[in-house]
Amino acid sequence: MAKAEGPVWALGAMSGTSLDGVDAAMVLTDGHSVQEFGPVAYRPYTQAEQSVLRAALGRWPGDPGVAEAAEVVETAHAELLSRFSGVDVVGFHGQTLAHDPKGRGTHQAGNGSLLAQVLDRPVVWDFRSSDVALGGQGAPLAPFYHFALAKRIGATEPLAFLNLGGVGNLTWVDPAQPAPEVPGALLAFDTGPANAPIDDLIRGRLGRDRDDGGSLAAKGRVRKQVIEAFLAHPYFYRVPPKSLDRNDFAGLLQAVKPLGTEAALATLTAAAAAAVAQGAEHFPKPISRLLVTGGGRHNATLMRHLSRKFPCPVQPVEAAGLDGDMLEAQAFAFLAVRVMRGLPTSCASTTGVPAAVGGGQVSRP
């Protein structure tokens, strides 16, 4: 990396659990603050590539299909990342195939040292393993970036970032604190199911990928007894930090099975919002605003439910001048610079790891 101190241009890449493709984004950062946002790009996976990746989900290194999945991930990333110029360092997350922090560990497919040779740039990768090895959950890793963003947008009061992916997760931030690893600066945890059960239900019943804009959910009647039973789940009473697997709430889909499609979607959408509101009970101090990122921010029905549950403004991150589609890719660019400079990337209040720890290994060309 060109400069030992001061800001550098970092390129981050993220491929999420939806398996739709790879996001890439550049940020100018010193690993503490974000000076500038750079170019972004997206490379979708083909249907054939998605099939290879889907077949490898839940598998560990050496299992059948894993080498083929890694090749898909490496090829797609090499194609996309080689389009960028002026890059000092690359943050490569890879594709999560299996995550079992209290058991076998965590497995992201894709070899960063191979990418370093192809791109002729230092590549930081395998971000989660050291956190898991030291007793942390290995997730979420975006909170340290959320802290930098809160500073960048000039926040002075506590606020929260809500990522609505397959699972929802919250980061509570106190921007008055000097650094993300300082006690009282951050609290992060998974809230519960978000888009995953909604998408699974609509795919199973109508063959569509999502409830666009929450339009079908808007027509259905929410079944309050299903929500009440859902909120009785012991997960909601566990003290954060805590994390979930995509399928930990399979019972919710079973509970809405007898309902018509609109009522089922209305109930699942209301459940996602109820889980977030329940999570907010754990916040150390009330928040001044809730900034929403991830695909769920496009679901107007879900956003409406959230607005009713919070006394503060609930807005997509775009309201603060941020990019909700590229935020996670930017996070791994930012974290790559932190790893290169020996700064921590997670701490007790974000992943439950006993002490602040820096993840990631560095491969040089």
Image (cartoon, rainbow, N blue to C red):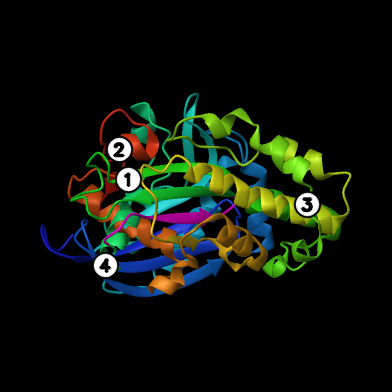
Q: Position of residue 187 (x, y in %)?
A: 37, 43
* Whole-number angstrom distance, CA of label 2 to CA of label 4: 23 Å
- Considering only vertical position in the picture, is 216 above or below 250? below
Label 1 element class: strand
Which residue does the numbered mark 4 point to in the structure image?
A: 154
Is any atom of residue 117 visible in this view?
Answer: no
> Which kind of residue does numbered mark 1 sit on?
Leu
Place residue 1 in its image quadrant. Answer: bottom left
Label 2 element class: loop
In the image, farthest residue toward the top: 103
Residue range corresponding to the magenta coloring: 156-166
Label 4 element class: loop
Instruction: Decide which of 132, 218 is in the foreground and name it.
Output: 218
Residues marked 4 and 1 touching at CB (< 8 Å): no
Residue 201 shown left or right of residue 315 in the figure: right
Residues marked 1 and 2 touching at CB (< 8 Å): yes
Q: Which mark is residue 186?
A: 1
Which residue does the numbered mark 2 point to in the structure image?
A: 347
